[in-house]
Image: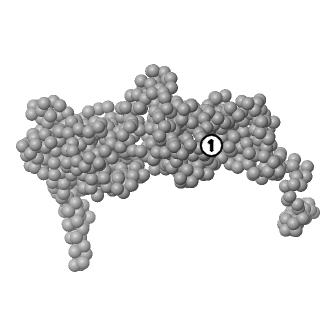
Amino acid sequence: MSAPVSKAVFAVAVFALVGCEGPQSAFSGTAPESSRVIFLTWVMIIGGTIILAVVCGAIAAAISGPASWKRALRNERVILYGGIAFPVIVLTLLLFYGFVLLRAGDSLVSDENALRVAVVGEQWWWRVIYETRGGETFETANELRIPVGRTVAIELTSADVIHSFWVPAYAGKLDMIPGRTNTLHIKAKHPGLARGQCAEYCGGAHALMSFFVEALPEDEFEQWIEKEKSPALRNNEAGARLFHAVGCGGCHTVRGTSAKGVIGPDLTHVASRHSLAAAALDNDEAAFQRWLRMHQKIKPDNRMPGFDFLSDEEIAELASYLGGLE
Amino acid sequence: MVLSRRIFLKGVLILAGLALAGAVGAVLFAYSGLYNVAASRGHPLWLNWFLETGMRRSVQFHSGDAPPPDLSDPALIALGAAHFQGGCAPCHGAPGQPINPVYEHMLPSPPSLSGHVPRWEDRELFWIVEHGLQYAGMPAWSGENRQDEVWAVAAFLRRLPEMDAKTYQALARGNAEIERASAAQFVNTGRSALHLTACARCHEHDAAPPSGLVPRLAGQPQTYLKRALNEYREDKRQSGIMEPVAASLDESQIAKLADYYASLPTPPANNAPPGKVFAGKRIALEGDPKRGLPPCESCHGAAALADYPRLAGQSVEYIVSQLELWRRGGRAQTPQGDLMAEIAERMSDEQIDAVANYYAGGGGR
């Protein structure tokens, strides 16, 4: 192999491996379930590679090996043991190994301390409903925060079409099906930020239906819950009035104000999230402005109607108000 | 065999030659200026027959077979009459009003419609009013996608033959005679002279409009009224009835009219069935989240932008007709209209009927 070619191969390999890093990587799982999935994946990749090498060696020997090897490979018993018995035994063992490793049929439901969260897939965002220890519920959107070391029971359903909830760092995919509740259990070992993605094609903006999951130490999580369930912070009274006058409250809730709409995402603490528009945008005032001006370009056919008649000053006022909803 | 082919070829050549000669002759004839285009001269009989027959057959051929709405609806007839007075009567005359002599000398002379209407079917009347007639000076409807308005004129035309001058005037004049403001009143209240003539025919503050399809303007926010008139004037909001009216207004007249109507009290409630009012109230205050329908009051409530209209006191017919117009894309040309089109598409027929009854029956104040 010449020097430039091997350099190019090295570069491609590096880029390919970079894809295995990051908050949405299926290879950097940190939770028990995803660690087991990754372990099984490696067992299969390494085992499969060894078997492939042996088969390639046998083919090479059959084509151009010594006459005695060719004769040995022609033997009917080689076909019988190597071609039939070996795959049957290996695949059967692998199947049961997979069951045992991934603890099929077992579940973490028995954890009485489990945090219950309902996530509803909607075109194209995530409605998130938390249940506190006291049994009261409150709503947020497009983001989950979970306590480290505690089981989280995520009840998945859909408001429209089939979606799929996938946070590779924590677990495998689980479909969200209209009229049915699927429960996914996850548990974080360490604090950290992971990214999730809808993994079932659900319409035009499917690729822009993502979210973040942040694992927090138990005490920080409790603080977050206290803040998240409380009403919105008062800020920018003029912006708040404009938000109301434009009609935003017809679809969005800002708890503690007259905005009580339940059609779109809850915006009570929207500014404290890691992203906007289901991880389609960063979360700052510029992003709010961008969304208000051109959300149908950012996420075509989303259900929010256009507000193209608002002036630049009005857009800035609304963005400032929303940016203050920490 | 050979002979017949030769004859055939010869025939083709002769025909082609004649066609060419005819075309050249026609061009030469036009160029020569010999034909007299004077309207005073009238059409020769043969040409008259040719044009009349062509028109009749064309209208029969092109008018669709969509079922007409109920043309005996008084709201449609009154709306059509009010528009007829401003848009059609100058050329066609009306009961008690002869055709203006200027227009009478057009060629063809605009017919008095009382005698002509019975010759046409409903769908043909509708088609002529919507599309106009070539070579006859009959203009097409000036509001795109406003078939609802065109049907109003067709409904009125259907009644025209048996209509006497008194009935016609009552229909066409609307409320114009109800109240006349003196010059002093004008100065004190900002009433424009224009309001007394054109606007008050349909939009008077203290009387119901002549047709349920006409909105009540009293108490609407001034900003909204200005926007509406400007949108009509700039051909953004489509209406064959309001666009010609708004086209004749200037900025200061629009401002005065908006001030005037905004200063009037919200119109009173009408009677509406309590069941529908109750169902409509729910939609107006809570929306229907399952359909993605926000509450009407979130944008039409007291604290909403002055750019948005208020709904209290509008008639059931008006609200229903506008929501249907939105649903078929007829009011989506402005940014605000586009927003409402998105919302109207999420409403069912029953929901439209219910909210219309809620607002007509006293809701939204």
Image mark 1: chain: B
Q: Residue at x 39, y 37 (%)?
A: B301
Front residue of A67/A119: it is: A119
- Residue A3, image x, y percentages: 22, 78
Q: Is residue B267 left or right of residue A185?
A: right
Q: Nearer the viewer, residue B348 or A314?
A: A314
Q: Is residue A164 visible?
A: no
Q: Is residue A7 above or below residue A247?
A: below
Q: Nearer the viewer, residue A263 or B84?
A: B84
Type of amino acid at the residue the image marks with label 1: Ala
Q: Quadrant of residue A285?
A: bottom left
Residue sitting at 48 percent across and 27 percent down? Answer: B269
Mark 1, secondary structure of its residue: loop
Q: Position of residue A266 (x, y in %)?
A: 27, 41
- Name the residue furthest top: B274
Residue at 42% from the left image edge and 24% from the top image edge: B278
Question: Going by the image, does B301 lie left or right of B235?
Answer: left
Extreme-bottom residue of the structure: A3
Residue ranking furthest to the front:
B184
Query: Which residue position is annotated with label 1?
Result: B198
Image coords of residue B329 (percent x, y): 52, 44
Q: Who is closer to the viewer here, A22 or A86?
A: A22
The residue under the point 45% across, 27% down is B362
Q: Quadrant of the N terminus of chain A?
A: bottom left
Bin the neighbour count of mark 1 within 10 Å (Cα to Cα): few under 14, some 14-19, many 20 and up: some
Q: Is residue B227 visible?
A: yes
| Residue B107 image position (x, y, % from top left) | 82, 51
Left or right: residue B44 versus residue A211 is: right
Instruction: State how the image is colored.
Output: one colour
